[in-house]
Structures are given as C-alpha cells and as structure tokens.
Image (cartoon, grey):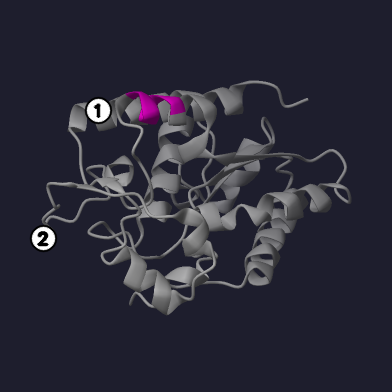
Amino acid sequence: MKFASLSWQDAEKYLQKDDMCILPIGCTEQHAFLSLCTDSILAEKISLDAAGPLNIPVLPVLNYGHTPLFMDYPGTITLKIETLCSITQDILDSLVHHGFHRILIVNGHGGNMPLSAYIDKWKLNNHGVKIKFHNWWNAPKTIAKVFEIDPVASHASWMENFEWTRLKKAEQPELQKEMIDIELLRKSTPEEVRRLLGDGNFGGYYSRSDDEMNQIWETAIMETRELLMNDWS
C-alpha cells in the first residue's frame, strides 16, 4: 500500500501491529528511448507489487540519484553522493523515530550503490533497526532470468523496456547494439559519454516480447517479496 493512501492515524494504527516499510530509490536520467524516470518507475512498482499482498506500506519513491556521467543528456538530474546519503539518512531517521524498525530499501539505479555502505555505518548508531538494501534488477534470481532470456542486456536496453517505462511516441530501433566498454565509459567525461553512447543504450536489443518481460518481472516480484517475508534477524 502506498504512503499516499494513508493518513497519520492510519500510520499510527499500522505501527501498533508491525514495524516494516519499503523505501524505493530511483533516479532521473537518460534511458535512450525510454522514460527519463525509468529507474524510479521500476523501483516504485516492484516495491508496490511485492508488498501488495502483505499490506506493507511503501514510501514515495526518491526520484533523484547519483548520475554525473549522463549530465550531457538533457533531462538528467544528478545529486552529489553526499547529498543522496544525507537525504536518505533524514528519511531513515524520521522512520525510526516513528517506530519503523524493519526497512527494505529497493534501489533501482546503479549509481546509488555507494549508499549501501553509508547505511551500514548509519546502522552502527541505530541498534535494533534492520535494513536490507536490495538492488532489484541485479538480484541473483532476477539477473539469472535476464541472462537466460538474453545475456546481452544493459542500461537502457531491452531489460528495462517494460510496458510501464515505454513511451508511446518513441519508436524502438530493431537492432542489437554492440556493448560499450564499461571501463572506458567510467573514465570518460559527460561529453565523451554522450559521444561514445549516442542514444544512451549501453548495448543489446532495444526491446523484447512482453511475455519475456513479464517473466522477468514476476521473478523480481517474488525475489523482493521473499526479502520482506524472511530473515530479519
């Protein structure tokens, strides 16, 4: 259930019987012919789909992340990693103050991963609080399903092209783009990144069948739900 559907009284009542919630974190950045908000859309939806049958509240998605290399693509918004960590800490401090002590962070963006180590340090001063940091797209079962369908999968390629990230006005190229050299990309300036990537796809087909995408999504839902249901010790 969405936080947006709760009043403060609803939240107080929920906390009398449970202390679990989900914080989705995404990003606003170029995704070739997909939505600029792809990472945020996916992080929020996987959270809601996984939590739905369990009636666990899902916070509004944090729509901005750390993505400096894409700043030559209009529409990309980047936070300094220090800013991202500070915002996340303020959110966690607020949640813990109210009594949420089991928190699943569902991350949808690779550039946000340094946040995991920061949260580990935060937990040292917040005994009794349990936090799981879940990169939903490359969790073991989900990424295995991706590679089972097509091992050439990457940023802004078919593996992020779901019905809910697709733009109706955008035509997807019908080709398999050659994979970029990731190490070269990481050493490049934003201007060089745009020159190297062109449309923004790192490599792979731009789309695959909805049946294949639904297989991935169902796998991701179940893998995320398992984290909610198991091993909070």
Against 208, residue 38 (above or below) is below
Q: Secondary structure at mark 2?
A: loop
- What kind of residue is marked 2? Lys
Give the magenta range.
144-148
**Quarter of the image where one finds residue 71:** bottom left
> How would you rate the neighbour count of disc 2 (Cα within 10 Å): few for under 14, some for 14-19, many for 20 or more?
few
Relative image position of residue 167 (x, y in whole percent): 18, 56
**Which label sits on residue 169?**
2
Asked if residue 161 lies left or right of residue 16, the reply is left
Tag 1–tag 2 contact (CB < 8 Å): no
Against 194, residue 173 (above or below) is above
Q: Secondary structure at mark 1?
A: helix
> How would you rate the neighbour count of disc 1 (Cα within 10 Å): few for under 14, some for 14-19, many for 20 or more?
some
**Quarter of the image where one finds residue 194:** bottom left
Residue closer to the observer: 10 or 76: 76
Residue closer to the observer: 15 or 230: 230
- What kind of residue is marked 1? Glu
Relative image position of residue 73 (x, y in whole percent): 34, 74
Q: Residue at x 64, y 67 (%)?
A: 81
Residue closer to the observer: 26 or 7: 26
Report which residue position mark 1 lands on. 212
Relative image position of residue 141 (x, y in whole percent): 48, 24
